[in-house]
Amino acid sequence: MGSVVFKNVVKNFGALNVLRSLDLTVPDHKFLALLGPSGCGKTTALRILAGLDMPTAGKVFIGERDVTRLQPRDRDIAMVFQSYALYPQMTVADNIGYPLWIRGTSEAGRKAKIGEVAAILEIGHLLDRRPRQLSGGQRQRVALARAIVRDPAAFLMDEPLSNLDARLRLTMRGEIKRLCQRLSATTIYVTHDQVEALTMADLVAVMQGGELQQMAPPIEIYDRPANRFVATFVGNPPMNILPAALCEQGVTVATGIVPVDQTRLAACRLAEIVEIGLRPEDCSVAPPGEAGVLQGEIYVVEPMGNETLVNVRLEGGNVQVRAGRDFRGVVGESIGVAFDPANACFFNSGGLTAVHRVNNNGRVK
């Protein structure tokens, strides 16, 4: 296995700048999710690493090797595509063993390795079938088996679960995570699905507009987003963003003044914050008229079974609140929204998170 490094990688397609000086290091044995919306450059970065596209500028390393100009076959990587890319005329066993056949592995060696990886992925009973005889989940397992059969330096996965139904995606998320942990494999996994990224990866790299916005463990991405984009892209429902202004008592949000301790208030003044960010689970519904509570009215109520999402219209914008499953408010009803400012993020005019939520140890960062 080996680490993966992008150094100042740029990719242009004519006048279109898809990647803008990408610097990214994936440590050896780590599972990294490249997360971002369509068109952000994540798949292009993966294709450059695989050797399917050449960078306009910059270098790519796998371990100590500069692989920037190497052919895909010389990079010691394995890729799992969104479409699985199985050979329809071959049996499952032949699909899995194809990379070994290309490398001249003996028939006995191929058979032993095919049996080993088929046992790991529990597809040994499918070896004589052809892809058209398999379900979507079975095809996915065959594609994974073909990728791991030769112990590559890195696994590359390009939205491999996007063609599966919701229930099967849930199952396969766990299977891929378990497999990568068992193999201790360096893995780069491209997805636009934040649930996949947060639940599967050791590290998440959020991209937008061809640039890396933040790279960190999933909990840090969620709790301490680097900027407004990361804060609103990661989280479902996303973080609420409202205009905010400082006053002597604290922060003015919508029509209310929320008290903030002096240390945190001084940090907000120094950073010249203009917006406040609140996760829906850090907000709660409250009776209207209480001190320190934002005043609004119920805009939408969405019962979710285990909880209720309440969309509250305030003067500065709408706020999503996670309420209990027994919430019984009705649209148009006056309501208050309460929150602890220690759980809020504050953004400056450039969209950067200038003041993060307070850590568990009570320090402001």
Image (spheres, rainbow, N blue to C red):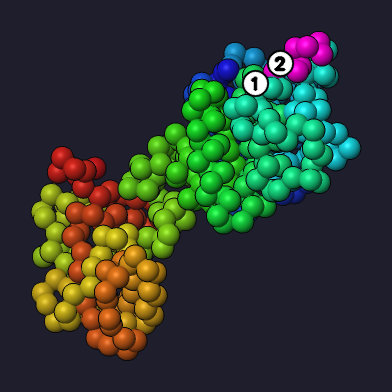
- Separation (CA) of disc 1 from disc 2: 6 Å
Residue at 50% across / 25% down in the picture? 182
Residue neighbourhood size for the residue with mark 2, other residues' Cα within 10 Å, grouped as few (<14), some (14–19), many (≥20): few
Residue labelled with disc 1: 116
Q: Which residues are magenta?
A: 106-113
Q: How far across and down, in percent of the image, does residue 111 sit?
A: 75, 18
Q: Nearer the viewer, residue 185 or 13?
A: 185
Image position of 218 with respect to 125: above or below: below
Q: Which mark is residue 185?
A: none
Residue 324 left/right relative to 16 = left
Q: Amino acid at mark 1?
A: Glu
Tag 1: Cα neighbours inside 10 Å, few (<14), some, or many (≥20)?
Answer: some
Q: Residue at x 60, y 13 (%)?
A: 64
Image x and y of residue 89, in percent: 89, 37
Given contact means CB atoms under 8 Å apart, are the residues at marks 1 and 2 in contact? yes
Residue sitting at x 53%, y 46%: 171
Q: Secondary structure at mark 2?
A: helix
Vertical position of residue 93 compared to residue 327: above or below: above
Q: Residue 338, image x and y in percent?
A: 20, 69
Q: Which label belongs to residue 112?
A: 2
The amino acid type, in three-letter code, at marker 2 is: Ala
Question: Image check: 142 left or right of 263?
Answer: right
**Residue 111 is one of the magenta-drawn residues:** yes
In terms of depth relative to the viewer, which is nearer, 311 or 65? 311
